[in-house]
Amino acid sequence: MATSNATPKEDPDGFTDPAQAAIAAAIDELVDNEKALAAVQANKTRILADIDLLGRKTYIRDRLRGNPAETSWNSSPWDDEELGRRTMAAEVAFALRLNRNTAGIMVFEATRLVGQLPLFQKALSEGTISWGHAREMLEVTENLPAEVLPAFERQVLPAAKKYTATRFGQVAVKVRERLHPVPLEERAAVSQKDRRVWVEPELNGMAWMKAYMKVDDAQAVFDRLTRMAKNLDESDLPKEEQRTLDQRRTDVFRDLLVDGVGPDGLGQGIRGTVSITVPVLTLMGKSDEPAILNGHSPIDAETARKIAGTATSFTRILVHPETGCTLSVGRESYSPPAELKKYTEVRDGTCRAPGCNRQATNSDLDHTQPWSDGGTTSADNLVHLCTPCHRLKHQSSFTTSQKANGDLVWTSPSGKDYLTEPASYIGEAPPVADVAVEPPPAPPPPPLQPPTNDDPPPF
């Protein structure tokens, strides 16, 4: 991390430019603030590493005392260390309102930094590197054999103290390749097993679609999309209707994946499906209230009506008396009927563990009060949990309790309670908390005026 030790210049008469002095003081304060933030982040990693260790020791101790966590759920149990890590990561996620995977990565990175990269942890606590440099180091050393780490850390730390995080990462990658005992070809073959495609919803009815694949394949795909996009001649269209290269490339990408068929016929007759919840007045064209895609992504009314217009079937869920939906089969059946499963899918939207965004349609249905303990197959005793969260609930010391409106309370190993609410309160309004009304804030000062065309650029 850069340091500042400059002093304002004085002229021969001893005069100090006050503007220069003020800027120098502000920069020094900024540098001191950045060092303090780095020290706080170093302390946070230490706390997270301690929490991880506490979790693993607790579960190993409980097993030695003959008090294992419940393993009756129909799944291979995690071993003690894995269960301890996942339980503590979930507790961190619930406490900090994070996605469980995000919290798990955060805890894992903290244990790596504290346990495997002590020189970088020390430099972070001293403020000589930033958290950005530490993150680059964690990324570069992922899967690097333990016997190489000490030498690698010593060689690249000076670069971390000298360069920006991005530049440091570039230097570290070159050193990594020199020290790595496994040939790149073998590592690439192993990493290719992790290839995948996923979607990240964004604001304004948009989303990112990402793919993790071999770099040469990714570049070839991008190059082909670019060439196809450039071949689209729009010169005869009005200027306002012409698309940018990025827009054409994206449209080609969409058309190929939605409508295209592979050379071996793959994709023939297969169409993607989505699940949308549309307010009835929106569907009738009497309201523009947004619909909800797959439980959590708002989409505009016109798009929702267009999707609904091509749908092959509907599931009508208004309020309880309107649906005629079976909301309980009591103790008659362990498995819920299709209409009860659909009802809970729409109600929950996603996995009901705090911070988890896995779609309900891709999750398991869990009896909050276990069927073996007298629990019923009913809407007020069923919630969707993705497979990892389902396993965590049954194999760790987490417990859950459910309210009639679908609210679910998780009680953690530390005894803290965490509430999750359903995506939709079907048939009743959600509880409204009393909120104190504060006076409106004072109007902000007028914004700075942008420079005119006659002004010189700032840099």
Image (spheres, rainbow, N blue to C red):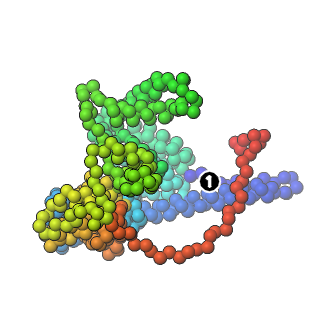
Query: Residue placed at 27% from the left, 40% from the top?
Result: 193
| Residue placed most toward the observer, 120 or 396 | 396
Residue type marked 1:
Thr
Q: Secondary structure at mark 1?
A: loop
404 over 276 or under it: above or below: below
Report x, y in % for residue 148.
Answer: 36, 46
Q: Residue at x 47, y 51 (%)?
A: 203
Q: Horizontal placement of 442 versus 130: left or right?
A: right
Q: Which residue does the numbered mark 1 point to in the structure image?
A: 3
In which quarter of the view is residue 114 placed? bottom left
Q: Residue at x 28, y 72 (%)?
A: 404
Horizontal and vertical percent position of residue 398: 27, 69
Residue 401 visible from this viewpoint: yes
Label 1 CA crowd tier, 10 Å (few <14, some 14–19, many 20+): few
**Going 79% across and 58% down the picture, which residue do you hit?**
18
Horizontally, is 84 left or right of 237 in the view? Answer: left
Left or right: where does residue 189 sit relative to residue 136?
left
Q: Dividing the picture into quarters, in which one does residue 196 lie?
A: top left
Q: Position of residue 42 (x, y in %)?
A: 47, 61
Image quadrant in which the C terminus is located:
top right
Q: Is residue 422 visible?
A: no
In front: 414, or 348? 348
Residue furthest out toward the right: 13
Expressed as whole percent of the image width and height from the top left, the position of residue 272 reads 30, 41
